[in-house]
Image (tube, rainbow, N blue to C red):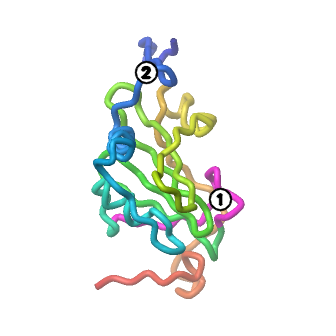
Amino acid sequence: MTRSRTGSIILIAYTSTPANDRVARLNRDLEGHRARLVFEGPSGYLRATLEALDVPIESQIAVFVPDSLQRGRIGLGNPRTIFFNESVAVAWVRGGFIELASQDPEQGLIFYMLDGVEVDTPRFARRNDCLTCHYSFATAGIPGTLARSSGRFVVDHRVPLDQRWGGWAAVSL
C-alpha cells in the first residue's frame, strides 16, 4: 500500500497481478504463434517491435544523456533513441537491447526489455529494476515516467550547428 501526493491510498499488486498492457498482449500473441518478430541486422527486433506495437518510426527522438540501464553505451556518438505512441515507449541504443515502457490500465507503467540477439521465439522480459527510478514521489507513488534535465550542456545560438545534438544533424523537409 502506498499514498499518492494527495494522500489517497493506491493499491496495486504490481508484481503479482497479470499485466494487460500492449506489450503483455504482444507477448501472449508471440507465445501463441499469432504474431512474429523478424530480426534485422544491427537493429535486431527494433523495426518489428515498432510495427507490432503500432509505434510510428517518425516519433523518434534522440537522447544523449546516459540515464538508463544502458548508460555505459549512451553518449554523444551513440544516443538512445526513443519511439512512442499513446501507450508505449520503445527505446534502443546501438549495441544494446530494446527497452519498453507500456501503460497498463490498472498498474501504471510496466517495464520490459528484449535482448539484442536472435532467438526462435523472442519474449519481452519484465524489468522491475526500472522501478528504482520510475516509482517515487516524482511519479505520484505509482510507476511512471520522468522528465528531467541533466544540465550538462548549454546549447544556444552561439554553438555551431555541427556541435549541437552530439554532432547529429537536425533536418526538416
Q: Crowding near pointer 1: few (<14 within 10 Å), some, many (20+)?
A: some
The image shows a total of numbered marks equal to 2
- In the rendered image, residue 104 lying in the magenta stretch gets the answer no
Picture quadrant where residue 25 is located = top left
Q: What element does badge 1 sit on?
A: loop
Q: What element does badge 2 sit on?
A: loop
Bounds of the magenta segment = 59-74
Q: Work out whether 4 lies above or below 52.
A: above
Residue at numbered disc 2:
17
Q: Crowding near pointer 2: few (<14 within 10 Å), some, many (20+)?
A: few
Residue at numbered disc 1:
66
Q: CA distance from mark 1 to mark 2?
A: 31 Å
Rendered residue at 55%/50% (across/down): 148
Q: Amino acid at mark 2?
A: Thr
Rendered residue at 48%/46% (across/down): 124
Give left or right: position of 133 versus 34: right
Give left or right: position of 162 versus 54: right
Q: Nearer the viewer, residue 107 or 168?
A: 107
Give left or right: position of 28 versus 124: left
- For discs 1 and 2, the disc positioned in front in the rendered view: 2
- List x then y, in percent, for residue 17: 43, 21
CB contact under 8 Å: marks 1 and 2: no
Rendered residue at 31%/52% (across/down): 35
- List x then y, in percent, for residue 46: 44, 63
Q: Work out whether 83 lies above or below 7.
A: below
Majority secondary structure in the magenta region: loop
- List x then y, in percent, for residue 11: 44, 14
Q: Nearer the viewer, residue 30 or 17?
A: 30
**Residue pushed farthest right?**
72
Q: Amino acid at mark 1?
A: Pro
